[in-house]
Amino acid sequence: MRDKIFAAVLLAFCSPLFADHIVNGKDWSQPNLFTGLSWNDISAVCNPDTGLCDGDLNGIDVTGKIWASVDEVNGLFNSFLPMSAQLGSGPATSSEFNSSGAPEFHSFFAPTLSYSSLQSVSGITRSLAPLGSAWHGTAQHSFGENINGAFTTALADTRSRASTEIGVWLYATAP
C-alpha cells in the first residue's frame, strides 16, 4: 500500500503540470504554485527592478529565479502565437478563433482558474503601470465546439490584494 501511495505522489509531481518548462532559453515555473500573493508580497522576496528573487513564496524557495516583466511574459506568449498575432511590448491582447497556440500553452502550464469549458493561467508580473497598478499576464483557452484562445497582458488590482486565481510569472535561465 505504501508503495502505491509513493507511486501516486511521484506521478503527480513528475507530471508536466507540476514541472517547469523551457521556452526560448527561460525555464518557466508554474504560476499556479504561487497563487494567493499580492504584488507587494512578491516584491518583498523578488526585486521589482531586476526581478531577482531571494527567499520563499508560498513555502517554495525561489532564490535565483527571476520575476518576469510584462515584456518577458509577452515573449513567452508569442512563442505560442502565429507571427500575425504576436504581442508587442507593454500591455497587449491577441485572440484567436480555433486556436492551436492556446491548447498547446495549456498542455505545459497548469490552470490558475478552471471551469467546465474554460481554463486560464494568470500571473502577476513585476511591471507597474504609470499610476502604480500591477500588470499581469493571462492565457485563456475555451474549448467545446470551437477552440478559442486569448493571450493578454493587462492591469490587475493585485498591488496590495491577493487572488487565488492569479499566480506569479517566474523563470530561471535555462542551463
Image: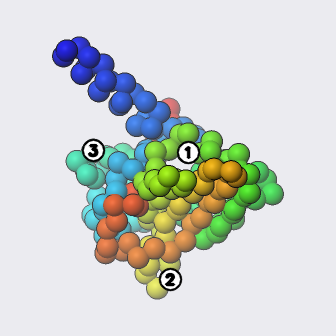
Going from the N terminus, do you reach mark 3 or mark 1 first?
3
The residue pinned by badge 1 equals 106
Cα–Cα gap, marks 2 and 3: 31 Å
Farthest residue to the right: give it: 84
Q: Residue at x 50, y 75 (%)?
A: 155
3 and 1 marks in contact (CB < 8 Å): no
Q: Nearer the viewer, mark 3 or mark 1?
A: 1
Label 1 element class: helix
Going from the N terminus, do you reach mark 2 or mark 3 first?
3
Going from the N terminus, do you reach mark 2 or mark 1 first?
1
As shown in the figure, which amino acid type bears the numbered disc 1?
A: His
The residue pinned by badge 2 equals 130
Residue 132 at what x, y percent from top left? 43, 81
User: Does residue 59 appear left or right of residue 42 in this picture?
Assistant: left
The residue pinned by badge 3 equals 61
Q: Which residue is drawn at 39% across and 27% down?
A: 14
